[in-house]
Image (spheres, rainbow, N blue to C red):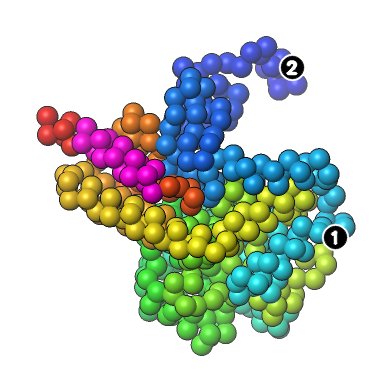
Amino acid sequence: MSAANATPPATPTKVGPTHTASVMGTYGRQNLVFERGEGSWLIATDGTRYLDFGSGVAVNALGHAHPKLVAALTEQAGKLWHTSNLYRVAGQERLAERLGAATFAERVFFCNSGAEACEGAIKIARRAHFVAGHTERVRIITFAGAFHGRTLTALAAAGNEKYLEGFGPPAEGFDQVSFHDADAAEACIGPETAAIMVEPIQGEGGVHVASPEFLRALRALCDRYGIYLILDEVQCGMGRTGKLFAHEWAGITPDIMAIAKGIGGGFPVGAILTTAAVAEGMTPGTHGSTFGGNPLAMAVAGTVLDIVLEPDFLDGVQQKALRLKQGLAELHDNYPTIVDEVRGQGLLAGLKVKVPVAEVVKEAIGEKLLLVGAADNTVRILPPLNVSEDEIADGVARLSRALDKLSKAANA
Ligand SMILES: *Cc1c(COP(=O)(O)O)cnc(C)c1O
């Protein structure tokens, strides 16, 4: 039957009880449908309340339905949604200035996702060398276990075979070395190297925190060899570690930084932050996005930034992170047959487990606690940044019950 003759079914085909075939099957989804959210809680269609310690993969930085974000979005929605980047966008100008005041950045480009921010970061690094006359400098050094998104170039950058399989020749121009190996990175630097690209915390890769020494060594290499340091703070940025950006813990600044996820608090926004020097080559026509930085996105992202920059907010994140870390350390002590290691920084925590990670996620759902799997058999614990200390204790108790069941099942 040709596609042109195919009549869509009146009702979507059901495949098993859990999903419809009409949505492309690219995700292994849990059979849960949520209807509402309130702070750290998600309410399913059957009324069951789940404690959300996944935050939509570090996206709902301020939980669900935060009244100030709802107000910012609805107020903007009544005024103006989209004008395109053919015109000045007031929200972009304001947010870029405020991001600049809070970080190393002197130039900001707004896009819609993390992958786009990472792609743009790579383009900007190459372009900066190009306009400086170093047209040969196009290669980017990246690290094993990295994740930079699902576009073809971002996949090539991360070099994960599993994600590249079947999608044709990987994009050229990436050299990969082991995470935490600055010597290997240095050995890899050649006349064609443009930049080093690294996540201060590998989230998808299994919550591997780059040490401050490693980040400082990479910064020093970039300075010595005249190449750029690109940080991917898509997951670890925007307050998640208890600083506005994770690299602040190392006392360094990048030349280029990709951000997304938490910056929109659930509204799709990405951004590339750079120094003025790096952005010199980014003249009219060199890069663009139809939706990037539209007024709705800017209204919400501006409000997220307001809240995260409120006095004491980031100290509060550090305080709660300490509580979480203590709780997870107890779980490590109590369930040594299940928990291998506690990792992470701030409210980006990971438990490397000795059973399949999917079993931990499933058992936690049984306790009405939402977590996120990651590579390296690690489960991620990513509560909203405005989670309460009581909710942290509640989440740890739920996780403890889930691990208890798994440990009894393992001993049975
Ligand atoms: C999620 C993520 C991305 C990709 O972001 P998308 O919005 O899914 O494109 C890139 N880098 C890191 C570190 C991420 O965690």
Residue interval drawn in magenta:
389-406
Which residue has dot 2 on it? 5
Q: Nearer the viewer, residue 21 or 72?
A: 72
Residue 321 in magenta?
no
SS state under label 1:
loop
- Residue ranking furthest to the top: 10
Which one is in front in this view, the residue at disc 2 or the one at disc 1?
1
The reply to whether dot 2 and dot 1 touch (C-beta < 8 Å) is no
- How many residues crowd around disc 1 within 10 Å: few (fewer than 14), some, or many (20 or more)? few
Q: What's the residue at 69%, 80% (across, down)?
A: 277
State the residue in front, 315 or 156: 315
Mark 1 C-beta to ligand 1 under 8 Å: no
Queried whether the magenta region covers residue 400, the answer comes back as yes
Q: Say above or below: 382 vs 399.
A: below
Mark-to-mark CA distance, 2 and 1: 45 Å
Give the main secondary structure, helix, strand or loop, of the magenta stretch.
helix
Q: Is mark 2 within 8 Å of ligand 1?
A: no
Name which residue lies at 23% across and 47% down.
331
- Considering only vertical position in the picture, is 342 above or below 272? above
Taking 85 as reference, is 123 left or right? left
> Which residue carries the number 1 mark?
88
**Going by the image, does 250 lie left or right of 223?**
left
Residue 285 at x, y percent in the picture: 82, 64
Q: Which mark is residue 214?
A: none
Q: Tell me the element at label 2.
A: loop
- Res 186 quadrant in image: bottom left
Q: Residues within 10 Å of mark 2 (few under 14, many from 20)?
A: few
In what quadrant of the picture does the C terminus appear?
Answer: top left
Q: Position of residue 182 (x, y in %)?
A: 39, 76
Instruction: Name which residue type carries label 1.
Output: Arg
Q: Is residue 84 visible?
A: yes
Rendered location of residue 320, percent (x, y): 39, 55
